[in-house]
């Protein structure tokens, strides 16, 4: 009775989605959509709702502690948009980098935090060394160390520190959950992502494109 639905069923991904999300498809709502693009979006949204709502045998989260559907959508949308900007289809956690921060304050906050913590770290180290080696007063040693810390800290940020600060900023701005790897594995168990080793990709380019537009 629905020729347009049958036409979309000829696309393998759409047929699979219809099978998995048939309970989420409302024919009355379907009939109100007139464009092919609108119907594809409707099916994709129905598929996402169905996958996030079904029982999951993978224990990435304890029962009742799974991410909320709106959080999952937001995190995957952010990931898809950053991947699209990089023109890449695969993602690893190691690919997280400062360039993915928004320019409206996030990048500046990152740079400030990295520089400040680096200066404090190196300042303490140099101050302690100067106090021991040069037999300086502790106060003078810390001042000398602070000066050295500023110079070294501005030139050489700690790699581990940079990654930690980046994760903190992304987390507090709502772009990723704290345990990102667990979430990505969870999304893969929901058949939204596909995991190969430590690499992740969206299960189909249509779903990838859909998340970039959310």
Image (tube, helix red, strand yellow):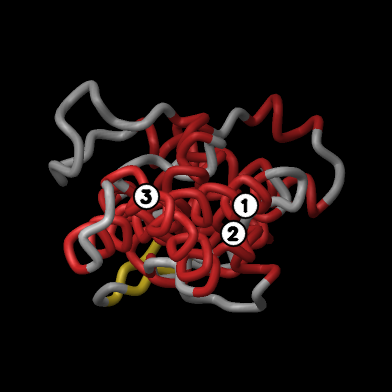
The answer to whether residue 30 shows anywhere in this view is yes
Mark 3–mark 1 Cα distance, whole angstroms, equals 56 Å
198 sits to left or right of 97: left
Mark 3–mark 2 Cα distance, whole angstroms, equals 51 Å
105 sits to left or right of 123: right
Q: Position of residue 207 (x, y in %)?
A: 57, 58
Asked if labels 1 and 3 touch by Cβ distance under 8 angstroms, the answer is no
Q: Residue at x 77, y 45 (%)?
A: 104
Element assignment for label 1: helix
* 3 vs 1, front mark: 3
The answer to whether residue 3 shows anywhere in this view is no
| Circle number at residue 140 | 3
- List the residue tagged with mark 1: 211
Seen from the viewer's position, the closer of residues 73 and 160 is: 160
- List the residue tagged with mark 2: 80
Mark 2–mark 1 Cα distance, whole angstroms, equals 6 Å
């Amino acid at each position: 009775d629905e020729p347009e639905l049958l036409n979309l069923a000829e696309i393998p991904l759409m047929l699979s989605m219809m099978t998995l999300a048939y309970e989420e498809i409302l024919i009355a709502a379907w009939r109100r959509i007139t464009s092919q693009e609108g119907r594809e979006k409707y099916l994709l949204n129905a598929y996402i709702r169905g996958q996030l709502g079904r029982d999951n045998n993978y224990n990435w989260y304890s029962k009742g502690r799974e991410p909320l559907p709106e959080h999952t959508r937001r995190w995957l949308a952010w990931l898809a948009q950053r991947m699209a900007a990089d023109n890449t289809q695969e993602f690893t956690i190691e690919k997280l980098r400062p360039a993915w921060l928004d320019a409206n304050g996030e990048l500046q906050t990152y740079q400030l935090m990295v520089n400040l913590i680096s200066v404090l770290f190196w300042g303490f180290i140099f101050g302690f060394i100067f106090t021991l080696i040069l037999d300086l007063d502790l106060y003078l040693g810390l001042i000398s160390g602070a000066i050295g810390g500023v110079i070294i800290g501005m030139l050489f940020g700690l790699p581990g520190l940079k990654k930690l600060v980046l994760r903190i900023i992304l987390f507090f701005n709502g772009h990723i959950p704290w345990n990102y790897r667990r979430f990505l594995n969870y999304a893969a168990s929901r058949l939204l992502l596909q995991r190969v080793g430590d690499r992740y990709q969206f299960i189909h380019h249509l779903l990838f494109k859909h998340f970039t537009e959310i």
